[in-house]
Image: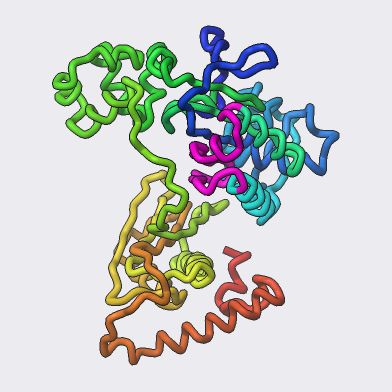
Amino acid sequence: MGRNTALPEAFERFRVTDSTRPDDTGCHVLHVDMDAFFAAVELRTRPELVDRPVVVAGAGPRSVVLSANYPARRFGISSAMPVAAARKLCPHAVYLPPTRGLYSEVSRSVMALFREITPLVEPLSLDEAFLDVGGALRRLGATATEIGARLRARVEAEHGVTCSVGVAGVKFAAKLASGMAKPDGMVVVPVRETVSFLRPLPVSALWGVGPKTAEVLRGHGLHTIADIAATPLDRLRRWVGVATAEHLHALAHGRDERPVVPESEEKSLGAERTFDTDLTDREAQERQLLDLSEKVAATLRRRGLRGRTVSIKVRFSDFRTITRARTLSGATDVAREIHATAVSLLEEAATAPVRLLGVRVEGLSGATDAEQLTLEDVRPTSRWRDAEIAVDSARSKFGVAAVRPASLLARDTD
């Protein structure tokens, strides 16, 4: 709950309107969430489709919905839904292919706009972020609600898309509020009313409560946040464990000590691909691992990072999913080394047909960080790295397809 959640009638007093402005004294956290972001970005150049159901998705038979505008959502279409299911719900919708790179470009511009207001911006994804405007309140001589209104107006005026804003004293409540504000609205949770705002909501609204935890809580008669707040902590600990119990108990009482963190250190980088038809041929699987390894390595080099652990993700035709990982003797950003490790890990897994493969590099550090040299550093990996850096340069000038491993020229036949 909290994302794309209609505001119940009992909560309307928290919505900001021309005639209603809830007390935002002490509120310094904003959660800004773009409305149907990918679809909205595409519709900027397709205004004739604004009132029609529009879905952004790939064309493959196993593609999923990346974004759906609000007319499409009225038919039950949602993000991550299989496209086949979406077409059954709304066969007359307009299905648009995603535009590569466009959403990241718009996201960067929007986040830069946020940083003009405050340096304390914590992006959660391309289309949402937390902002701590505590300093901006004093600097701009404005209230949190006024800052939220300015942001919404600028995002729409400068980028042609809308966003919804939640305003609160803590991150958890602000995120819930932005979901309730959708689309194109703002909801304020007054600090003194945080607990009363939370109490009627279902336990599933609590951050960290998934289907299994919600089922356990409901099994013990806890259906609302008020129920959790009224339950003795010792009893909660017995039911869901010490850490989860203390976490949920604090949230149920409106306590969330998490600060807005503007720069979170990246811990891993990866890429994965779902195939239109299951891959049964090992050579084809290894080619896909090479393509993914190239993407990951190029991203690492572009960001000045290296990683020590290589992992793969394999999803089989029966949807069973496994991961395997191996830590290297030294950090790397070389596709050849990542690929060799990924292939070795795949050989240790089952040989059943696969529908998804993923490659991830973890344990990241800066490429310029001091490294302990070993005899292995006389290896030819450094020469491969030089070659791959040259490829990076060629691709930046002539496009991604300018230079590719010969084995990938056959990927379209996989």
| Percent x, y of residue 11 | 52, 12
Judge whether residue 346 can be spotted in this image: no
Give whichever of 359, 209 is nearer the camera.
209
Residue at 56% over, 78% down? 405
Q: Is residue 132 magenta?
A: yes
Judge whether residue 247 can be spotted in this image: yes
| Percent x, y of residue 265 | 40, 57
As drawn, the residue found furthest toward the top would be 10
Q: Quadrant of the C terminus?
A: bottom right
Q: Is residue 266 left or right of residue 392?
A: left
Q: Is residue 231 left or right of residue 226?
A: left
Q: Is residue 372 left or right of residue 176?
A: left
As drawn, the residue found furthest toward the bottom would be 378
| Percent x, y of residue 213 | 30, 27
Residue at 49% over, 58% down? 271
Instruction: Check the image and report above or below for 317 versus 358.
Output: above
Q: Is residue 24 magenta?
A: no
Q: How is the image coloured?
A: rainbow
Residue at 53% over, 18% down? 23
Q: Is residue 40 left or right of residue 364?
A: right
Instruction: Check the image and report above or below for 345 versus 260.
Output: below
Give whichever of 57, 210 is nearer the camera.
210
Q: Quadrant of residue 197?
A: top left
| Percent x, y of residue 339 | 42, 72
Residues drawn in magenta:
116-145
